[in-house]
Image: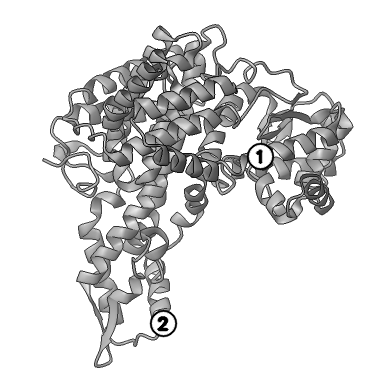
Amino acid sequence: MSRLDYADLFAADLPEGAANAVVELERLEAACQEKAKRGEADAELLADAQATYARLLEAVSKLPSAPSSEPTAELRVRFAESVLMWLEFGKTSSEPRLDSVGTQSLRAFPLDLPLDEAAFLRIRRALARGLALEDGTLAEAERQVRHLTSALPLKLALTQAIQAQLGAAQPEDRLALLRQAYGDLPLSPTDVDVILTDTGLFFILPIAGEQLDVSDWSERPAAVREQIQAFLQKLARGNLTETWRFPAFGLLEPERMDPSWIDALAEQTRVRRDVVQQTLVTMVSVLPKSEIDQYLVHDAWGHTWQEALNEFEWEYALLRAAANPLSPDDGPLFGGHPTPPLHTAFFAVSGTVQLDEMQLIPIVDADLRGRIQVGLSAALSEVMADFVEAKFSRLNPTHQLPTSSLLLPVSLKFDLTLQDVLRQARRWSSPYRGFRDDPAQRLAFRTRLLALGLPEAGLDAAVEKARQLISTHFATALVPGIVGANGATTVATRALLKLTQLSAALETLLSEAAAHRASPPWLEPSYCPDLWAVSVSHLYESERQTRFWELDALVRGTLRNACDALGDALADA
């Protein structure tokens, strides 16, 4: 039987004991499809989904689990860096600097560790003792964290400059600011609200489908309404596809930004204008007014730190390329160095093209693993944002956040995770499914090989042999769905089982944090979800492809022990 690990990623059989868990995954997917068909969920569907999630967590608890990694020197250093990042977590968002809406969710976010230099000093001292770190090791960790968080001061400087520009944020000023970011849209001043945090600029519009929910909508000139509708349509399309601006999402076209605005901000912050513009595109979002509490905490506190403290952004930027048709030049971009391009597996002997399958298979293996990694990074990013959001709901039982999930606000949104993984599976498999199934895509692949200098003779046979080899060796990666019948499986199924195991471990942490929260919370790091979020993500990023499959074990073992040791050192202090 295969295991849920990196080595068995493309295995065709289910891990021992996983069949019941796959059944529950299929039931949860069916509930998601039912909700999509209806357009909403009634009480019965919500109850069924919650019961399915509970059974799913119970089912994965019976799966054989990987042993917890030994607390190696590398893991101790990674945890030390995570704790130092935790000291910066409170700077990655904030209560609103400006808020013309009057939302309460950002003000109610329960930081585990406020910006308190005395607390920071005490934690640093305890960190050195609790992990038995040498002075040089801790100093190097501090240098690494300073590098990772180097963009934070610029974001703070930019929001200070924008706040100074807005002043009291009168409607005319808010509209002018939106036009500086999005161009000369024919909106009315009262259409635009603004929420500004230390690291984010949120434009709030009264969006209702493809029009504005305003009393005078029908009275506005037809040309104005058409232009606004075109913008809202473009905005809606960009919400899922435009991920390159992470941690901001959705539509923003840098070429439409007002150059004089960029120049003024560059002068105020004393930073090059290209750096100002590149930073701004990671800070600006548009949210529908009726749904701001559904998104604000999730985006401002759930995602912002993943770019400010971690490095999820570069993989989000790769998502746009992950589904492009397969090219003979593919391989290095997703497979990484020293993966050669696919075309190197095709060569000519006596004027006839041959295929070196011993060359082809490792290239496709590396390329597919890289594409899968990029997709799973995006899914994991959402899981950790949901974890922070669920922490908010657990600790604010009277201030529940609205959600599109079928599951309770106090839990992880695993139904959304399931849909994220299947969406990414469609993306990572698309190039190879197209090469396998679409003659037009194979023709384009063949044409590129000709352009690279290969002869016509034998080319069709070589391309067809490549198609057959890929279909045979990587079949489980090319099925973007949940499969568990007759013991078979897919890469997407395996990834969902692993994320279920991680979610079970994170749900335990949330329950413990709600039950045992100290005052102040940072005195007991084991019950601080913010630290857990940063630590899980940082350990993942240190070795993305392999460590994804170890995260649940790290939470239960190495990270738990490290948090406990830090807590003991804080108590001794």
Residue at 23%, 26% (x, y): give it.
Answer: 60
Pick whichever of labels 2 and 1 is earlier in the sequence.
1
Quarter placement of the N terminus: top left
Q: Position of residue 499 (x, y in %)?
A: 33, 33
Q: In the structure shown, which secondary structural element does the residue marked by tag 2 occupy?
A: loop
Q: Report the residue that reaches farthest toward the front.
A: 135
Q: Nearer the viewer, residue 389 or 554?
A: 554
Question: Label 2 belongs to which residue?
Answer: 452
Mark number displayed over residue 286: none
- Count of labels in the image: 2
Give the left or right position of residue 325, taking residue 285 as reference.
Answer: left
**What distance separates the C-alpha of mark 2 from that of mark 1?**
47 Å
Q: In the structure shown, which secondary structural element does the residue marked by tag 1 occupy?
A: helix
Give the left or right position of residue 302, taking residue 219 as reference.
Answer: left
Give the left or right position of residue 158, taking residue 16 as reference.
Answer: right
Residue at 32%, 53% (x, y): give it.
Answer: 369
Regarding residue 419, the answer to whether it shows in the image is no
Quarter placement of the C terminus: top left
Q: Position of residue 453 (x, y in %)?
A: 39, 86
Image quadrant in which you'd find residue 347: bottom left
Question: Label 1 belongs to which residue?
Answer: 153
Q: What's the residue type where badge 1 is placed?
A: Pro
Q: Position of residue 398 (x, y in %)?
A: 55, 6
Image quadrant in which you'd find residue 115: top right
Q: Is residue 54 above or below residue 178?
A: above
Residue at 89%, 33% (x, y): give it.
Answer: 172
Residue at 33%, 26% (x, y): give it.
Answer: 562
Q: Nearer the viewer, residue 1 or 143?
A: 143
Looking at the rendered image, the disc whose residue lies closer to the viewer, 2 or 1, is 1
Q: Nearer the viewer, residue 273 or 426?
A: 273
Q: What's the residue type where badge 2 is placed?
A: Leu
